[in-house]
Amino acid sequence: MVVVVVDADHEAEIDRLHVDLLSNVFLLITSFTDLAQASSVCKGWREGARRSLARRERLSLGGWNMDDESTARIVGYAHNLKDLDISRSCWGCQITDEGLHKISLAKCIRNLTSISLWGMTGITDDGVIQLVSRASSLEHLNIGGTFITDESLFAIANCCPRLKAIVLWSCRHVTESGLIALVNNCNKLESINVWGMRIPAECFSGILAIRPALRIKPQGNYVGNVSA
């Protein structure tokens, strides 16, 4: 084990770095893990990390054991955020409807263009509806691997007019009614991932009749493996 001892003089030198300079440097850090470690060095670095969060446009919480409170707090700092990934594939993320409710109150919510909630089995229609009702700029949404129903899709159809792509991977409680609502209301919709859904093939023929240019993935095989 390597133990680093920082003497008082060295620590004082670190504290003299201007917080705006630190913020600019920390903005270059792409790993949230590294940013969190930097913020623990001293008070000045913590403030620099907080300010860099406020300027970030993309945030992925991979590698951290996040809960509702900590996730909402971090998103609350990220005033300019446009891309938020809190999916289950990010190890340890345990978010529920309560967390989505709190995130929906963040300053950045109306600027978000991309949200991934993939595999988050702790959320329901209640949390998703609250979130998307305020995410009016949303263009890309991944809610695959969740237990949402048509109620979430109805809310998305009504609140997200700019939606271009949605992943509904294995959302087996969604029916034809939800998909039709999306296609009819989201005029900019370009792509839907329907892998593993319990939707009859004739439904997709009807959807394509409404929106011929829509890309339905996986193409030509609505129960097969989706390609990357």
Image (cartoon, helix red, strand yellow):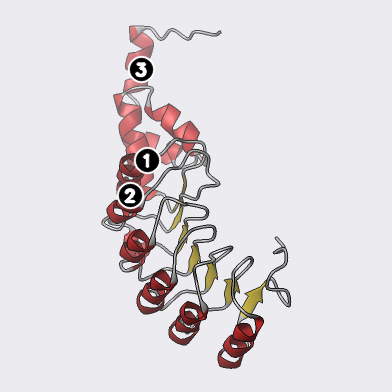
Residue designated by label 1? 67
Closer to the eye: label 2 or 3: 2
User: Residue drawn at (40%, 62%), measured in percent from left and top?
Assistant: 112
What amino acid is labelled 3 in the image?
Glu
Closer to the eye: label 3 or 1: 1
Residue designated by label 2? 99
Give the residue furthest to the bottom: 209
Residue designated by label 3? 13
User: Residue drawn at (47%, 70%), measured in percent from left and top?
Assistant: 139
User: Residue drawn at (29%, 55%), measured in percent from left and top?
Assistant: 101
Mark 2–mark 1 CB contact (< 8 Å): yes
x and y percentages locating residue 142 in the rendered image: 51, 62
Marks 3 and 1, how far apart in space?
Answer: 35 Å
Question: In this orientation, which residue lies closer to the viewer: 211 or 177?
Answer: 177
Q: For the N terminus, give its image quadrant.
A: top right
Marks 2 and 3, how far apart in space?
Answer: 39 Å
Provide the secondary structure element on which disc 2 rests: helix
Q: Residues within 10 Å of mark 2 (few under 14, many from 20)?
A: many
What amino acid is labelled 1 in the image?
Asp
Q: Is residue 141 left or right of residue 133?
A: right
